[in-house]
Image: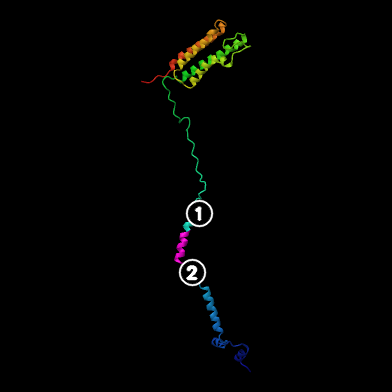
């Protein structure tokens, strides 16, 4: 009868020792495997000489970077450079503007207003004389008959000088009272030729001229004088 140890040896294969396995392998097999592994290692290992940078190449690359940047920032000769427009001058608010300095010989603001209103009244009065002359059929010398009127520039003669007085007051000219008195005398001279033919209308013209002269004379009170 077989023992347990004999049965085990018969049923289980016995592994050969390592030394025997290597000894039983065909000749040259282990050498070829070792050589292939070494070749793979050599192929995967980088070559130090290949990875080493040439100093000259590095210098050329570093010198090329500023050149590229300079080329990128350079402006072509035919390029149009936009320049900002100048800012418009600032005149400030009306409160910041310097006040106008009045000169000696001018009228004060209040008297200039009175002067202008006086001569506006004279113009309105002369216009009323014109209307009355046409309505009543009493032609004045500067109007002429309705069938054959005077040229328009001649019809405007009594209005010219009073209108100039209004403009002069707005412009704040000096010596306005004297100019007003001269205008009043000229208006009286325009009305004198009609005293014989149409004394009523001529008298109204003279009265208007005198009114303008009185306003002008009264405005002497508003003349500015030089401070001593």
Locate the C terminus and report the quarter of the image it occupies: top left
Which of these two is toward me, 113 or 171? 171
Q: Is residue 85 above or below residue 177?
A: below
Q: Would you say the magenta stretch is mainly helix, strand or loop?
A: helix
Give the residue number, with chain letter if any, for mark 1: 72
Q: Where is 214 relative to 72, above or below?
A: above
Frontmost of labels 1 and 2 is 1
Who's the residue at 48% across and 58% down the image?
Answer: 65
User: Would you say 140 lies left or right of 47 here?
Assistant: right
* SS for dot 1: helix
Residue 216 pos. (x, y %): 47, 14
Structure colour scheme: rainbow
Earlier-in-chain disc, 1 versus 2: 2
In-front residue for pair 141/68:
141
Q: What residue did someone put label 2 on?
A: 51
Q: Position of residue 116 (x, y in %)?
A: 50, 18
Q: Residue at x 49, y 72 (%)?
A: 47
Report the magenta residues as a range: 50-64
**x%, y% of residue 141?**
57, 10
In this rendering, position of residue 204 left or right of residue 222 = right
Q: Is residue 128 above or below residue 72?
A: above
Q: Residue furthest top?
A: 196
State which quarter of the image contains the N terminus.
bottom right
Local packing at callout 1 (Cα closer than 10 Å; few below 14, some 14-19, many 20+) is few
SS at circle 2: helix
Give yes or no for residue 43 being in the magenta stretch: no
């Amino acid at each position: 009868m077989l023992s347990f140890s004999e049965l085990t040896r018969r049923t289980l294969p016995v592994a050969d020792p390592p030394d025997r396995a290597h000894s039983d392998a065909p000749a040259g097999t282990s050498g070829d495997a070792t050589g292939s592994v070494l070749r793979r290692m050599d192929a995967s290992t980088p070559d130090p000489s290949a990875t080493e940078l040439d100093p000259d190449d590095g210098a050329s690359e570093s010198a090329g970077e500023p050149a590229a940047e300079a080329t990128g920032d350079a402006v072509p000769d035919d390029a149009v450079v936009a320049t900002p427009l100048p800012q418009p001058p600032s005149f400030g608010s009306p409160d910041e503007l310097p006040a106008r300095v009045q000169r000696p010989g001018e009228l004060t603001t209040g008297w200039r207003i009175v002067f202008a209103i006086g001569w506006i009244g004279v113009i309105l009065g002369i216009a009323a004389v014109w209307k009355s002359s046409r309505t009543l059929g009493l032609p004045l010398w500067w109007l002429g008959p309705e069938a054959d009127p005077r040229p328009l520039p001649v019809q405007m003669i009594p209005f010219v000088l009073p209108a100039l007085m209004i403009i002069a007051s707005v412009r704040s000219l000096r010596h306005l009272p004297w100019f007003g008195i001269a205008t009043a005398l000229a208006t009286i001279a325009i009305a004198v030729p009609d005293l014989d033919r149409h004394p009523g209308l001529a008298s109204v013209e003279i009265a208007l001229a005198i009114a303008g002269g009185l306003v002008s004379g009264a405005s002497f009170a508003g003349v500015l004088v030089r401070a001593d």
